[in-house]
Image: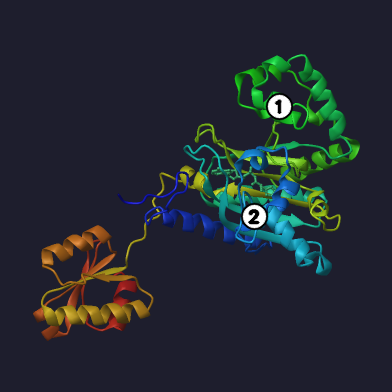
Amino acid sequence: MAITGIKGFNDILPGEVEKWQHIEATARRVFELYGLSEIRIPIMEKTELFCRSIGDATDIVEKEMYSFEDKGGNKVTLRPEGTASVMRAYVEHKMHALDPVARLYYMGPMFRYERPQKGRYRQFHQIGAEITGVAAPTVDAQVLTMLTHFFQELGLTEPSLQINSLGCPCCRPAYREALKKFLLDRIDKLCDDCKRRYDTNPLRALDCKSAGCQEATKGAPSMLDHLCPECGDHFDKTRKYLELVGTPYSINPRMVRGLDYYTRTTFEMVTTMLGSQSAVAAGGRYDGLISEIGGPQIPGIGFAMGVERVALLLAEKDFSRRPDLFIAALGDEAHSEAFRLMSALQRLGLAVEIDYEGKSLKSQMRRADKFSSRFTLIIGGDELARGTAPLKNMDVGNQAEVALDAASIHAAMNAGA
Ligand code: HAM
């Protein structure tokens, strides 16, 4: 029996991969306009890094990590996200010593043992961005504007931006207590998960999808009403800067993120088009994370988008590539000439196809049709004798006789033939 891939681990095949390349190229282009540089981080880290940064009481660390002991007995984990690794690299390489401000982006696979469904996989891909060293709300607005700009460049009107503030270690504990007090009377309605994390992570009940939790949290106190003056001011200024540059957003006071490192601004890009997997991108500020993993007290903010989910939103668009030219040849000599011209034209920067086996003209034309090349050139004995052949523009249908040398064909194609 043939061996199949692992459940939740997908192949991205030609046809689909062009869409991914377009998403990645757009991210690079837009992020670099905002001064970001790429960082490449390993796929595996010490398990401890994720426990300490993401938080022991989160779903990711409790039940979703691919953790194991390697042959040397080291506890390692396939990265479930990128922020912890990027910050580990930032601290390890003392990037802050030169300049605390680092503006970084990354892309690649992440691993979470979740129940696979549309838009949710066990190996999935993120494109993420992280900016360290600036506590000012201009950076929050800049990051959110960059993310919005990226989706606009892709031509997507969905998803839309929702923001919230989760406060800081100064104001969140009092809010937690207020929320716990509110939930205590309704604890029977909470789902088993939220009952279990009532003490460790009560905020999760606010964005839990179970009907009981939604019922129980109706009218619950809001973090936004409990922000300390500094966090309140930060949130107001972030909104002001977003409005100043025309970045649309709405406030979702129930947004709680599934990772513990967030402080102040949190956000999600949400869509109604992917069922329950509504977050296409998500992130927030993490002003305590760098010191939590052993670095200096330096603030940070960032996000990651799920590439599979972005690709699903782009489902209708066609990114397939067309070759520039298909050369059909009749007879051995013409076949050699087609092969020679193909090679010369590829060196001039054109995507050219021939039929490798020199089949019948009919089957060659079928192949040209399948490739949907922009131009076709047909070479037979007569053409070889004349030293010219008909070059046809397949989009407009006009045809021109061109000399059988690469430069002439190239020029004729540029001129539209
Ligand atoms: P996250 O919300 O866990 O945040 O994931 C970010 C995005 O990754 C989600 O909005 C979603 O699009 C995608 N995603 C997550 N899990 C899956 C999955 N199983 N299958 C498909 N897509 C998925 C983070 O990972 C943070 N590191 C984001 C961040 C960066 N915060 C600050 N900086």
Q: Nearer the viewer, residue 12 or 53?
A: 53
Q: What's the residue type where badge 1 is placed?
A: Arg
- Disc number placed over residue 406 in the picture, else none: none
Give the label, 1 or 2, closer to the camera.
2
Q: Position of residue 229 (x, y in %)?
A: 90, 36
User: Ligand 1 closer than 8 Å to the CB at disc 2?
Assistant: no
Q: Position of residue 368 (x, y in %)?
A: 22, 63
Q: Residues within 10 Å of mark 2 (few under 14, many from 20)?
A: some
Image region (quadrant) for ligand 1: top right
Q: What's the residue type where badge 2 is placed?
A: Val
* In the rendered image, the vertical position of residue 181 relative to residue 108, given as above or below: above
| SS state under label 2 | strand
* In the rendered image, the vertical position of residue 111 relative to residue 93, given as above or below: above
Residue hosting label 2: 76
Regarding residue 279, the answer to whether it shows in the image is yes
Give the colour scheme of this rendering: rainbow
Q: Nearer the viewer, residue 188 or 149?
A: 188
| SS state under label 1 | helix
* Residue pictured at 70% horizontal, 17% vertical: 216
Q: Position of residue 104 (x, y in %)?
A: 68, 60
Q: Is residue 350 left or right of residue 258?
A: left
Which quadrant of the figure has residue 332? bottom left
Which quadrant of the figure has residue 263? top right
* Residue pictured at 80% horizontal, 24% vertical: 179
- Disc number placed over residue 196 in the picture, else none: 1
Q: Nearer the viewer, residue 37 or 176?
A: 176
